[in-house]
Amino acid sequence: MNPEIAQVLIIVGGALLLLISDRIRVDVIALMVLGTLALTGLVTPTEALSGFSSPAVITVWAVFIMSGALARSGIANQIGRQVLRVAGNGEARLIAAIMLSAGLMSAFLNNVGVVAIMLPVVMDIARRTKRSPSRFLIPLAYGSLLGGLTTLIGTPANILVNEVLSDSGLPTFNLFDFTPVGLILLVTGILVMILIGRHMLPDRNLHKSLAQSPQELLEDIYDVEQRLFLLALPEGSPLSGKSLAESRVGAALGLQVIAILRETESVLSPMAGTVLQDGDRLLVEGRIESVVVFQHQNFLDFSRDTLDVGQLFSAETSLCEVTLAYDSNLTGRTLMESGFRERFGVIVLAIKHDELAQRTNFQGKKLFAGDALLIQGLNERLEKIRNSPEWSSFGYLEVDEVNERYKLFERIRIMTVPEGSSLTGKTLAESRLADAFGICVLGIHYKDHTDLTPDVDHIIQDGDQLLVEVWPEDLKVLQGLKSLEVLRGELPDLRTLQNDHIGLFEVVLSPHTTLDGKTLRELHFREKYGLSTLAVWRGGRPYRSQLRDMPLRFGDALLLHGPRDKFKVLGAEPDFLVLTEEAQQAPRTEKAPLALLILFAFIVSVVLGFLPIALAAVIGATAMVLTGVLTMDEAYRHIDWKSVFLIAGMLPLGIALQQTGAAEFVAQGLLGAAGKLGTYGIMGGLFLLTALTSQILPNAVVAVLMAPIAISASIELGISPLPFTMIVAISASSSFLTPAAHPTNSLIMGPGGYRVTDFIKVGLPLIIVILLLTLFIVPVFWPL
């Protein structure tokens, strides 16, 4: 082993560790690999950047656009519906039809896009046939993966293997060279699923009666009933006459109000502005113990006396007013989203918008250019941020100016933390006093001094005296929350939660989402869409509490309740996929003939050799936009940019593996380990190594790493590299064993209610059959 080989293998090992750890985005890791290869001199600068001009990368993003165009024109959806229509109601026939539909579409469409298109269709079929979607969704995902093996453009792994062959000066595959082997594997996969796999599929009735019986859905699957109870407003409640948002039932108690029950007419899925009345019974979801603890524990003793604004000034601290600049990065974001206090080290006491000062409940309000912020902080800190480009003006204020402009004198008071308070032991940040109760902590009063700039990590202790800003009305709200009556009797019939206007639906993040990692609070989800989130299904179990602060993940299934017309609005959003056809965005069916014509022209030009596949794909994608099948913005959205940068960044690693002899070195190790088993043993070892690696790494990365090794191994054996590289392409797409192995698996995990073990039980027999069949048929079509 020479030093260059050692360097390449160290880079490969480091990249694999980073990819497995999942601490850094895969596309960033790919760019780190690119940079490291260039800095170490293992590849030239031109070779390091060659991935971005590679025909493989160009083909991948252009095919993403054409795939999106076929979906937007409704062609893919129509094909799926027609095939499923003739399948009848038998489970085996439905599974076969689902896998066949997904497989045929995946020959020309992106795998994840096919699953996203078919998901609402399959969910509706599950409801219509009164079967669990868990019986159909794994077959859907596996069908799309197997279908990607039927053409050169079916999956990025195929394209990348072909690119490695081309870069090595070897014969390459044509568009339909994959088809004979791919179709055999697809049909075999369908048979395996019908004869073996379907008997291992779980039968979790997550959505069996979504349309007919919300009670069954809520009770048996998401187990929401365990968290449902009633709260009653007594006569003369301080909450009477206040809106649902002003009541802070959600923010302070962590509850979700599903309905307001009244003697006259109940309000289903009430909006934030719905006004509460005496005698209202609130059907809420959450932890009943949070209400009991709040009502029976005196978490703060309130002083009735207000304090002078001068209490906020000291020799070390001052108050300032800043005005947000027109080009400020803070505009369009809330104080929480921007991390204002952590970033600038000051406290915001009030916000003035259009000359109207808001002194409470502004943590979740979006900021606008020209807004004035009243801030308090250490003089040293204020001087440091004085010239920040975020504001157009900065000025210190005196006591009289603060009182005149912001009228804080009615709102500043002392609150004492009593012994045994629920706040004791929490940090100021964990207490959520501002967000939950509208209480802004301005300082902590000690015997000999007052700390006017307390750290958010300050731990609250019994006896602490907090200098706070609070609106008198918010104190009345706290009294009203304490006076709510918990009704432990029977719940109303949950079937009443749905009617012609209000419904229960499930939603997942779409493959094109930009919301992964964001919380419902950050998205202002309820305010924006008017829908309540009752539960989130993740990792094989439901979550029902503190949902608005739970970061969303790709693959989560959200159970939503609200007006049906709101779901149609949500269905038109590119970030969400509503799991029913009635809420889907209407396709451009009038463009379907044009889309088919462009696809046909693309295929003919490639098969007859008129154009290279990359150029044909770019022209086809451009034609889709020019003819209005999809807009340019939609085209950009359908490109999986993470995959594009991942592939472009990793391709130089394939070059380095070949040029340094690292691929030959690893190939010799493979031959030494499996050589005694003969050529078929080596092929089997190559398949297993590639397939197992693809369960934890993106298949594009696996293809880039394994294709050079396969080529070197075939050269060492003196046989054609085509069968070995075909095996790499097949095994790299055999991502059946874990939900993280491929985005298609992640997408169906939440809606199917699957656990990791479900993929292992169903996927393992399929991989074994695919392995044995591949070793038998590949040499038939591609002689050794």
Image (spheres, rainbow, N blue to C red):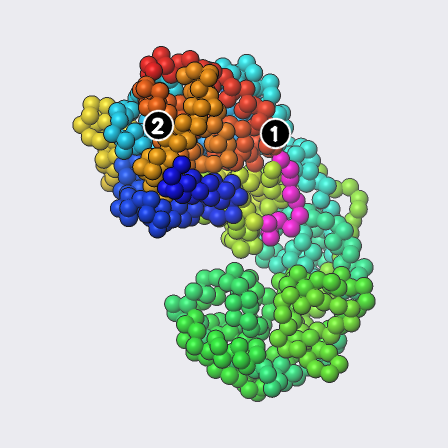
Residue 398 location, x and y as percent?
55, 87
How many numbered circles does the render carry? Answer: 2
In the image, 711 versus 595, the foreground residue is 711
What residue lies at 64% left-to-right and 72% top-to-bottom?
454
Whether residues under marks 1 and 2 lie with C-beta atoms below 8 angstroms apart, the answer is no
Give the Cα separation between the discs numbered 1 and 2: 36 Å
- Determine whether the residue tagged by mark 2 lies in a helix, strand or loop: helix
Residue 565 location, x and y as percent?
50, 43
Residue that badge 2 annotates:
712
Q: Nearer the N terminus, badge 1 or badge 2?
A: 2
What residue lies at 62% left-to-right and 75% top-to-bottom?
453
What residue lies at 65% left-to-right and 55% top-to-bottom?
250
Label 1: few (<14), some (14–19) or many (≥20) C-alpha neighbours in 10 Å:
few
- Determine whether the residue tagged by mark 1 lies in a helix, strand or loop: helix
Residue 503 location, x and y as percent?
58, 40
Q: Residue furthest left?
A: 610
In the image, 742 versus 728, the foreground residue is 728
Amino acid type, callout 2: Ser
* Residue 183: quarter of image: top left
Q: Which residues are magenta?
A: 540-550
Q: Is residue 486 left or right of residue 718?
A: right
Q: Which mark is residue 757?
A: 1
Q: Which mark is residue 354?
A: none
Image quadrant occupied by the C terminus: top left
Amino acid type, callout 1: Thr
